[in-house]
Image (spheres, helix red, strand yellow):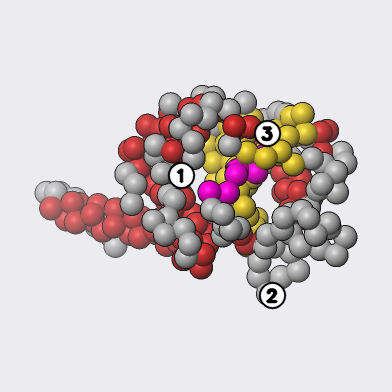
Amino acid sequence: MISPLKIESAIKSTHDQSSFINGLLIDTLNWPLSEAAERIEDISYEWTGEELNFLDLDKHILEGQIWQLQPVQSTQQAWGIFILEFANPDVFIKGRGFTGLLRKVLRGLVPNRRKSSSIPSWRSDNILFICTHKWEHYRFAHFRSDSNEKLARLSTFGWGPGTSNRTACEFNLPELEWPDDDTDKDAWIKKWSKAFDKEELTKQFYKTFADLYYQVIEEVGKTPGLTSRA
């Protein structure tokens, strides 16, 4: 597992496309991308609003750009990885329209009867969105299907100027390390999905809280003149 300190250092050094690709994705998360890449278009394909059946895309996203990272396998890999450049930071700071917009993009990526057979498709569970504004604000997003729900649930994590990145460094990003065996699709999907498993984060939070609580109780008991009411 990658050290949270290494991830934090990479995040603090990420300020443009080159440092995002080389510092975070390649050097830290071990993604097998070209080290010669300086810009996203060097390692990606651009999707248009027409291909996504989403013609007003450019009203919401900077220059209408959605990039798909080029697969590293000759056959379709387990995950489709997409980078969205947003025109302003409101969706990161206030969450305005973020979920609705990603759902529209998602509908253009999953299989449907109106879609051309020549355009690639993925299950909603197998798509990773990396959203950014000026390569300073970041939000990683993933839709998880549930047989008991009509709509796939969106889970996200991220960071930006002036925000804490502790959770991303300790719990989320380590799970997005590139797998040793990326031909084992089931294992890969399970591993990356854990990056968005809020239940595990909640369990870890309460475990940490409980450990601190009992540590304080023990220290109070050792201090003359102080007693615990627990």
Residue 74 falls left or right of residue 218: right
Q: x, y (%) of residue 196?
A: 53, 55
Tell me the crowding category of disc 1: few under 14, some 14 to 19, or many 20 or more residues within 10 angstroms, Cα based.
some
Instruction: Identify the mark at residue 85; answer none if there is no mark.
Output: 3
Circle 3 sits in a helix, a strand or a loop, which is it? strand
| Residue found at x 82% / y 41% | 49
Tell me the crowding category of disc 2: few under 14, some 14 to 19, or many 20 or more residues within 10 angstroms, Cα based.
few
> Mark 2 highlights which residue?
148
Circle 2 sits in a helix, a strand or a loop, which is it? loop
What span is in magenta? 67-72
Nearest to the observer: residue 175 or residue 158:
175
Amino acid residing under circle 3: Glu
| Residue found at x 79% / y 40% | 48
Callout in the foreground (2, 3): 3
Q: Quadrant of the C terminus?
A: bottom left
Circle 1 sits in a helix, a strand or a loop, which is it? loop
- Label 1 to label 2: alpha-carbon separation: 34 Å
Nearest to the observer: residue 127 or residue 228:
127
> Mark 1 highlights which residue?
31
Q: Which of the two discs, 3 and 1, labels the residue nearer the N terminus?
A: 1
